[in-house]
Amino acid sequence: MIWRWLPVPLFYFHFVAADATLLDEDGIRFADSNAAMAHARDLMTELVRSPQTQDGAIVVENEDDGELFEVPRSNLLS
C-alpha cells in the first residue's frame, strides 16, 4: 500500500461585529470543515459568556475556498 499525505486545510476564524472586525491572520489547520465548524461554535460559545460581546459572528474562511460559513452570536443564545 502506498500512503499519500494530503494537505490539511488552513482555516481562519474572523470576528465581525457592528463596531469591530478582528481578522485571524494565523489560522488553524483542521482535517475538514466539520471540525472547523465545531471550533467556530466553541469560540462563539466563549464570546457569548463575555458581557462585552453584544453582537457579531465568527466568519470562517479557508485558504482554498474563501468564506465558508459563519456562526452568529444570536444562534447560541437561549
Image (cartoon, rainbow, N blue to C red):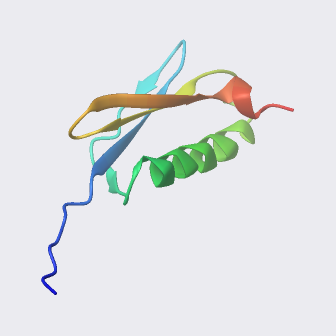
* Residue at 14% across, 73% down: 4
Q: How many numbered marks does the figure carry?
A: 0
Residue 30 screen position, x and y as percent? 37, 58
Taking the view exactly as shown, the residue that stands out farthest to the front is 1
* Residue at 25% across, 33% down: 65
Taking the view exactly as shown, the residue that stands out farthest to the top is 18
Quadrant for the N terminus in the image: bottom left
Taking the view exactly as shown, the residue that stands out farthest to the right is 78
In the image: residue 38, left or right of residue 23: right
Residue 21 screen position, x and y as percent? 43, 23
Quadrant for the C terminus in the image: top right
Taking the view exactly as shown, the residue that stands out farthest to the bottom is 1
Residue 14 screen position, x and y as percent? 42, 33
In the image: residue 19, left or right of residue 66: right
Of residues 53 and 2, the one drawn nearer to the viewer in this rendering = 2
Q: Is residue 58 visible?
A: no
**Quarter assignment of residue 44:** top right
* Residue at 57% across, 50% down: 38
Residue 1, relative to residue 70: is it above or below?
below
Of residues 73 and 19, the one drawn nearer to the viewer in this rendering = 73
Residue 77 screen position, x and y as percent? 80, 31
Q: Is residue 12 visible?
A: yes
* Residue at 19% across, 64% down: 6
In the image: residue 3, left or right of residue 47: left
